Image: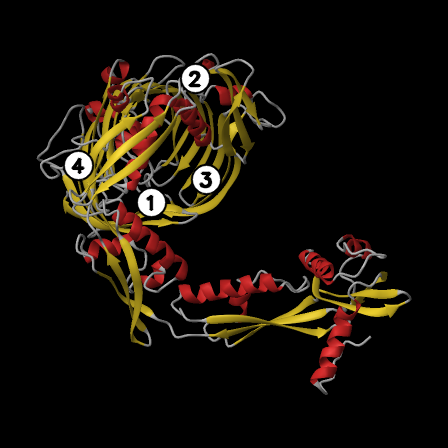
Amino acid sequence: MKFVLRRRSGFVLILCWLVTTGYGQVGQKIQQIDIRHVGPPAASESLVRANIRVKEGEAYVRTSVDDDVRSLYSTGFFYNIRVATEPADNGIKLIYVLQGKPTLTQINFEGNEQYGRRKLLKKVTSKVGEPLDERKLHLDALEIEKMYQKAGYQRTKVTPETRVENEAAGRGTVTFKIEEAQKVKVDDVEFVGANAFSQRKLRKVVKTRRWWIFSWITGGGVLKDEVFQDDKEKLTAFYQNEGYIDFELKDVKFDYLTDRKMVVRFIVSEGQQYRVGAVEIKGNTIFPTEEIMNGFWSEGRRMKPEMVPGAKETKRNPKGDIFTPEGLRRDTEAVRDFYWSKGYVDTFVRAIKIPNTERGTIDIVYEVRDEDKGQSYIEKVEIQGNTKTKDKVLRRELAVSPGEPFDLVRVRLSKSRLEQMRYFDKVETDIEPTDVQNRKNLVIDVEEGTTGHVELGAGFSSIDSLFGFVGYREGNFDLFNPPYFRGGGQKLRVGATIGLRRKDYQISFIEPWFLNRRLALGVDLYHSELNYYSDLYDFTQTGGRLSLTKALPYNFIGSLSYTLENIGLEDVDEENAPKIIIAEPDNRLVSKIGASLAYDTRNNAVEPTRGQRTELLTEVAGGPLGAEADFFKWEVRNSWFFPGFFEGHVWEVNARTGVVEPFGDSKDGPAPDNQEFARVPLFDRFFLGGVTSLRGFKYRTVGPHQDGEPVGGNTFYFGSVDYTIPIIERLKFAIFYDIGNVGEDAYHYDFRDYSDNWGVGIRLNIPQLGPLRLDYGIPISYDDENVSGSGKFQFSVGFTRDY
């Protein structure tokens, strides 16, 4: 048997090839099958023979042997497979020569100048000591190419070359040969043939952007293959959703101005814009067309088709709605959901488009199959997969119940509610037939997820200075299920914040279904030690709070609370502190009952761009448990959000006011210098200044002073206007104006005496860290007691300002 062929003549070569491959023995009986390994065996002989279908005693068939070779390769154990034959008594011997994948002993790079070995290795998933896998090495090469492309080296090519250093020992190496290209920056992005929209508007649709000064932060300004492919789809979707159904992206050209600059040109054919023509429903036998078009009510709003001629006619758009694929999809679902909401779950709806190029319209026919099989009803609701979460926690979120019509719209709503709980990695619903006609089971299958999270971190703000925090948060807590305490749908958070100017310890517990009603019971226990209020004293606060919160109709949220806390002053500098502070007791017990009503229509709680939040808060202090303060306090807080002058620009308008007034013994009792407002505890009075209010001033310095020390007042008003402009995807620029004042007495509003400031800021959303805001406020009107310097930097976490 020979594996090395001598190149002496074509005849000899062909003859040897025939002998080696076995063509000369086709049809002969296989007397023996041998397994031979080159280097260390990659798999056991039993595994090898299990993947060989050819058997001893059978006739030799070349195609069967080829199938065995493919089967052996598919196991992933072998680098090279050869099959040879030898003569044997009354037949042939079949020999499988197997070379296992060599062990990768070394990874090399050639031609890399822009990136060092350490950075390149981070993109390589193949590891030394693992089997040499050429498919995996190919994917590694693609990842290295992507890294170069993202940095602007678009034409860089990476080729992995493998080498078996020692077949007997089964060792191999790989060398990634890198042909680095020059960095090419995108000088311009143009849309040739685009007339319906401006170049500026179309540039905002795609993510391939011009190179600019901040491209090193955004990663833009260069051509990236994966982004470019998305851009082509986004451009098509944009035009189609503007009614240009015939839009076509003809070509994309890359014109190199120099070796390092290019212009990307999208060659487009817009076609004409289509509007909705006639709308018709056919095949409906159960409900009349007019009733279907009128829609149905779901979650407080009417769900009905919108692309009906005249449905959206305005002076600006007299011909009716623009036809869009997305609008057609929504309307088809609205017609289908009309039936599904009434339990007709077997109804099928299909939309047929009939274009009319002369009129520039598309007629729509909704073809309905609603054979009257009768309404379907829910026989029972089965929940599967909830190994930790109790059944009742899921069932109370469902919008459907056994015995009701099988409303698939409310089934979707139930699925959405379960997903929003964030207890499960997956939520699936299914319909299961039963033996009873028109009765079906609803099956809900969930996959439990992780609900407990450890929180560790550090931060800095203009108020707190440097601080660190540690905590634990459980979103599916169960107080009555020891020792694991999970599965009851309750929420628990335990945390501690320790910094240069503060110490906070807090335990929060929420039962969202108190007394089996959608009523949230909250319990908070806390202890705080703050020394950033003043240089003349340290502030401590220890207490607890009970609350009940309920979501009300029409976006209202109501809450009732009871707070009992001890307020303490420590290390008071009696030589320099004003009398009002010295008169404060070392410890004061405060008992408060509170109520609030909020109206919230914001489209996003973290980064709103539309809507408002208006809240009325009231507190009454005094009464039981030996409380040492009697006062009534109310506040109104308003925040409105509006679109700005251009896309992505946002107006934020804030207006707040509040009054605190003593009563009973607190009002009639003695006070330093006969100041009535002194009877309200120092830390329940109002202060302005700092990141949450007047940003051009120090924290809590705007308002009444005594001997140069801020002492707060009984009345305040505050207003602000912010205008934010997007710079890049995660960075925004802001300009703002703040105005406000604090009066000494209750209901003492003096609008002629105020402090105000203007300023600029940035809003930065950092992945894994969250939204940050940095503002620089410059005072305009002020008095000598509440300003120092020309301006103040204010730094905080979050885009909105909670006062």
What residue does disc 2 label? 373
Closest to the observer, 106 or 26? 26
Q: Quadrant of residue 406?
A: top left
- How far apart are the alpha carbons under marks 1 and 3? 15 Å
Q: Nearer the viewer, residue 555 or 521?
A: 555
Which is nearer the N-term, disc 1 or disc 4? 4
Judged by depth in the image, the label closer to the viewer, 1 or 3, is 1
Q: Position of residue 441 (x, y in %)?
A: 52, 19
- In the image, 151 versus 226, the foreground residue is 226
- Label 1 vs label 4, nearer the camera: 1
From the image, state whether disc 2 or disc 4 is nearer to you.
2
SS type, badge 2: loop
**Residue visible at 74% across and 84% down in the picture:** 6
Element under label 4? strand
- Gap in angstroms between the C-alphas marked 1 and 4: 20 Å
Determine crowd level at label 1: few under 14, some 14-19, many 20+ residues with C-alpha closer than 10 A: many
Residue marked by disc 3: 497
Say few, some or many: other residues with alpha carbon within 10 Å of mark 3 (under 14 / 14 to 19 / 20 or more). some
Left or right for 252, reference 199: right
Q: Earlier in the sequence, mark 3 or mark 4?
A: 3
Q: Give the residue number, with chain letter if any, for mark 4.
A: 740
Badge 3 amino acid: Thr
Q: Secondary structure at mark 1?
A: strand
Residue 276, image x, y percentages: 21, 37
Q: Residue furthest front?
A: 27
Q: Is residue 59 above or below residue 739?
A: below
- The residue lying furthest to the bottom in this view is 8
The tag earlier along the polypeptide, 3 or 2, is 2
What is the distance, in whole Å, between disc 2 and disc 4 at their CAs?
67 Å
Let me know if residue 800 appears in the view: no
